[in-house]
Amino acid sequence: MKLYSILTGNLKLDGGAMFGVVPKVIWNKLYPCDENNLCNWSMRCLLVEEGDRRILIDTGIGNKQSEKFFSNYYLNGADSLDSSLAKVGYTTDDITDVILTHLHFDHCGGAVRWNEERTDYLPAFKNATYYTSRQQWEWGTHPNNREKASFLKENILPLQEKGRLHLIESDDTLFPGVSVRLFNGHTDGQVIPFIRYNNTTVVYMADLMPSSAHIPLPFVMSYDTRPLITLKEKEAFLKEAVQNNYLLFFEHDLYKECCTVTETEKGFRMKESYNLSDLFQT
């Protein structure tokens, strides 16, 4: 097995929304914002190479939305999904499986692209099967008013229409060394992948904890639909992560790619931070 960090660019989101009830004077010391209260966040995907499978976890925001839409998020950074795959020797055609943790646009926008004539939407990974949970699919295709703006039908429906969608019913092992669990605080049926690499379990955190700054229990996003459930899910997960020395891989942390966790008198905190490429050099 080989693991590759796949950068797809950055976006800016309001710091208050990202840190919920935590005061700015506290979170801004951990994760800085600009004069408009905007923090810069990565959209970091993960490629798992296992045997003849090349499994991509999440796809970034994509490039098919309007200029007006993208202007709301101040996209920045030199990386793209295609260029990052090329750096590790692959193209979108080489991907065999895509795990979508959930269907918010910054996680699944790159899953679907325009055709050449811009008359139809096609799966961006033409040889891949796409996986997400049944709960999230139902949630995203029949959205509540609070989340509706995050679920874009052009990111979602073509996967089903083109017959490329597989729905996960419950916690399961999808591939050798790759299992998934479902979490419900951020959005219903969020898929969190657990990758067993040598003697280490790497957990792709998605929006269960978007950054290392979100490790302390009260740091819960305002975007979460059920923040008290997130709180319970985080606490149970972090206890398990400490006990088993999990390596947390962050999708949105611009500054820290991976870390381990410890429990202190003040609660859960980052133990040590790493870059995936340094930690698992071959």
Image (cartoon, rainbow, N blue to C red):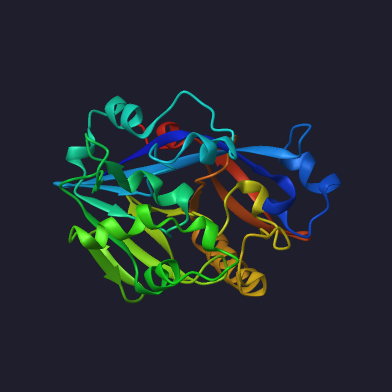
Where is residue 87 shown, x and y percent of the image? 31, 25
Where is residue 163 shown, x and y percent of the image? 17, 61
- Any part of residue 175 in sight: no
Question: What residue lies at 56% left-to-right and 37% top-to-bottom?
Answer: 11
- Any part of residue 32 in sight: yes
Where is residue 12 shown, x and y percent of the image? 62, 38
Horizontal relation, residue 102 to residue 259: left or right? left
Is 97 rendered above or below residue 244? above
Is 43 rendered above or below residue 178? above
Horizontal relation, residue 140 to residue 17: left or right? left
Nearer the observer, 58 or 108: 108
Quarter of the image for the N terminus: give it: top left
Quarter of the image for the C terminus: give it: top left
Q: Residue 280, located in which quarter of the rendered image?
A: top left
Q: Residue 4, located in which quarter of the rendered image?
A: top left
Horizontal relation, residue 180 to residue 213: left or right? left
* Circle count: 0
Question: What residue lies at 60% left-to-right and 40% top-to-bottom?
Answer: 72
Q: Give the residue furthest to the right.
A: 25
Question: What residue lies at 19% left-to-right and 57% top-to-bottom?
Answer: 162
Where is residue 157 shown, x and y percent of the image? 31, 60
